């Protein structure tokens, strides 16, 4: 398999080929705005970094941290342009993941099963990090006869390992708090997500927390790396995708996600996802 050097290229290739792709990234690949995409993402940090905002959670990033992001998770990586930030990103078409699973072993459980104490972040120990990099290098070095079978079998081994780590961790019940919060920003994120179906202005938000508009915008941007409005739009689109995939009607989804009118919903959804809500619903529910 060819090693890619762009997150966007890996995303596009996995969706186009209905397969998976691997990218090895450094500081020259600029962080995207708050976004969602139609594939699973595995983000493995080699050098550490700043913070990840995924849905309504903020995570510190340390070397060896693995993040598991579904197609419905809005996420944003704080700017890394001025520092070395080496990481490996694996993009996976969800249908491909299902095709290599079995009735007894659901390999995408690590993306979709979210019980109490769920975290997007998995901190790997030294041995687990070595195994992860071994599997990735084996996939990327498979270019001769039988490379397709080796890629698939190694991919399966990799995700059996990841799911087993999660299962063992849950069974041991030694989950430690992995999300890092600023107390005020934590409260703001909770309020925004609890009121996602309603219009929320910066002014009303400032009144809710008894602080000025400029201050609430400043602390939110400082903690999350994005603006309140961009965050709200990305979360609404993320929830809309999930509801449409469940078979709910476009008008109903528009209302439940807090868009002021259908034209705004159509414009925001199409810009973010690349197709209209109606078309996305049809694709999901064929």
Image (tube, helix red, strand yellow):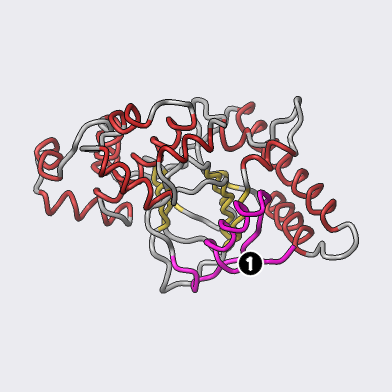
For image coordinates 15% across by 45% down, the residue present is 202
Residue 101 position within the rendered picture, expressed as x and y whole percent measured from the top left: 73, 35
Which quarter shows the N terminus? Answer: bottom right
As drawn, is 238 to the left or to the right of 89?
A: left
User: How many numbered discs?
Assistant: 1
Query: What is the residue that sits farthest to the right in this orientation?
Result: 145
Q: Quadrant of residue 240?
A: top left
**Vertical relation: 120 (above or below) 134:** above
- Residue 235: x percent and y percent? 35, 41
Let me know if residue 24 is in the magenta part.
yes
Q: Is residue 80 above or below residue 91?
A: below
Mark 1: few/some/many CA within 10 Å (<14, 14-19, 20+): some
Q: What residue sits 43% from the left and 30% below the top?
A: 243
Question: On the picture, is 31 further left or further right than 208?
Answer: right
Horizontal arrangement in the rendering, residue 222 relative to residue 34 (left or right): left
Write the residue at 19% across / 52% down: 217
In this figure, which residue is indicated by the disc labeled 1?
A: 4
Task: Name the foreground residue: 252 vs 239.
Answer: 252
Q: Which residues are magenta?
A: 1-30
Q: Quadrant of the C terminus?
A: top right
Q: Using the image, determine if residue 36 lies above or below residue 259.
A: below
> Residue 17: image x %, image y %?
66, 53
Pinpoint residue 41: horizontal percent, then vertical percent. Answer: 56, 49
The residue drawn where x is 41% and y is 53% is 76
What kind of element bears circle 1? loop
120 inside magenta stretch: no
């Amino acid at each position: 398999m060819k090693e890619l050097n762009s997150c966007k290229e890996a995303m596009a290739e996995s969706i186009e080929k209905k397969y998976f792709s691997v990218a090895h990234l450094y500081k020259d690949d600029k962080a995207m705005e708050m976004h969602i995409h139609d594939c699973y993402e595995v983000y493995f940090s080699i050098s550490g970094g700043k913070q990840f905002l995924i849905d309504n959670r903020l995570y510190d990033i340390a070397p060896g941290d693995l993040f598991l992001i579904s197609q419905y998770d809005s996420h944003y990586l704080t700017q890394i342009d001025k520092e070395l930030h080496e990481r490996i990103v694996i993009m996976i078409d969800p249908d491909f993941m299902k095709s290599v699973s079995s009735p007894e072993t659901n390999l995408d459980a690590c993306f979709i099963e979210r019980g109490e104490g769920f975290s997007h972040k998995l901190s790997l120990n030294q041995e687990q990090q070595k195994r992860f990099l071994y599997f990735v290098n084996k996939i990327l070095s498979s270019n001769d006869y039988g490379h397709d079978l080796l890629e698939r079998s190694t991919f399966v081994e990799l995700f059996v390992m990841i799911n087993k780590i999660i299962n063992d961790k849950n069974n041991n019940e030694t989950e430690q708090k992995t999300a890092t919060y600023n107390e005020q920003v934590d409260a703001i994120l909770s309020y925004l997500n609890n009121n996602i179906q309603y219009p929320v202005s910066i002014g009303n938000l400032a009144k809710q927390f008894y602080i000025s508009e400029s201050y609430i915008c400043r602390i939110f941007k400082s903690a999350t790396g994005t603006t309140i409005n961009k965050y709200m739009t990305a979360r609404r689109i993320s929830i809309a995708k999930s509801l449409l995939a469940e078979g709910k009607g476009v008008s109903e989804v528009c209302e439940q996600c807090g868009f002021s009118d259908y034209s705004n919903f159509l414009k925001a959804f199409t810009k973010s996802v690349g197709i209209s809500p109606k078309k996305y619903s049809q694709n999901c529910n064929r």
